[in-house]
Image: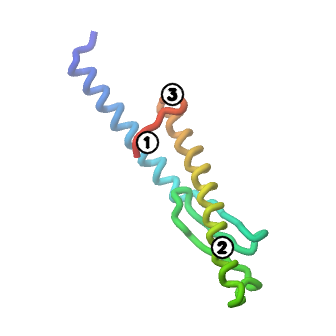
C-alpha cells in the first residue's frame, strides 16, 4: 500500500499534467478561426475560438452614409454570429482535451 505522501505526490503530478494540458488546449483556441456572417454575407467577421476579432469585411455596397445604422447593426450581428461559433468550437476543443485526461463528461474545470 502506498503511503499518504506518495499518494499526495501522485495527485499533485496529475493536477500539474491536467493544468498543462488545459493550458495547451486554451492556446490552441486562439489559433482556431471562425467566421460570423450577417446580411446574407455582406458583413463578415473572423474571430479566434477565444473570441479575439481577427478581421472585418464589409461589402462595398454597404458604404452609404444614409445606411450607417443598418451597417452598425449588421456588424454587431456578424460579431454575435462569430461569438456563438467560437463558443461551439471552444467547447468541442476543451471536451476533446478533457476526454484525453480521463475526466468524466460534463466535468467543469475552472479557467
Query: Does label 3 or label 2 sit earlier along the sequence?
Result: 2
Q: Nearer the viewer, residue 61 or 17?
A: 61
Q: Residue at x 46, y 37 (%)?
A: 108
Q: Residue at x 66, y 66 (%)?
A: 77
Q: Picture quarter containing residue 57?
A: bottom right
Q: Is residue 34 left or right of residue 24?
A: right
Percent coordinates x, y for residue 27 in the rendering: 46, 54
Q: Picture quarter containing residue 110?
A: top left
Q: Is residue 55 left or right of residue 12?
A: right
Which residue carries the number 2 mark? Answer: 73
Which residue carries the number 3 mark? Answer: 104
Q: Residues within 10 Å of mark 3 (few under 14, many from 20)?
A: few
Up/down of 67 relative to 57, above or below = below
For the image shown, how many numbered marks are present on the structure?
Answer: 3
Q: Residues within 10 Å of mark 1 (few under 14, many from 20)?
A: some
Which residue carries the number 1 mark? Answer: 21
How far apart, in angstroms, are the residues tagged by discs 2 and 1? Answer: 39 Å
Up/down of 75 relative to 104, above or below = below
Marks 3 and 2 in Cβ contact (< 8 Å):
no
* Element under disc 3: loop
How far apart, in angstroms, are the residues tagged by discs 3 and 2? Answer: 41 Å
Query: Does label 2 or label 1 sit earlier along the sequence?
Result: 1
Amino acid at each position: 500500500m502506498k503511503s499518504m505522501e506518495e499518494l499526495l505526490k501522485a495527485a499533485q503530478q496529475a493536477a500539474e499534467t491536467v493544468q498543462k494540458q488545459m493550458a495547451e488546449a486554451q492556446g490552441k483556441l486562439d489559433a482556431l478561426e471562425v467566421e460570423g456572417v450577417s446580411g446574407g454575407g455582406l458583413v463578415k467577421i473572423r474571430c479566434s475560438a477565444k473570441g479575439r476579432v481577427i478581421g472585418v469585411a464589409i461589402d462595398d455596397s454597404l458604404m452609404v452614409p444614409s445606411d450607417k445604422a443598418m451597417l452598425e447593426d449588421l456588424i454587431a450581428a456578424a460579431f454575435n454570429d462569430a461569438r456563438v461559433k467560437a463558443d461551439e468550437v471552444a467547447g468541442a476543443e476543451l471536451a476533446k482535451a478533457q476526454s484525453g485526461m480521463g475526466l468524466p463528461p460534463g466535468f467543469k474545470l475552472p479557467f
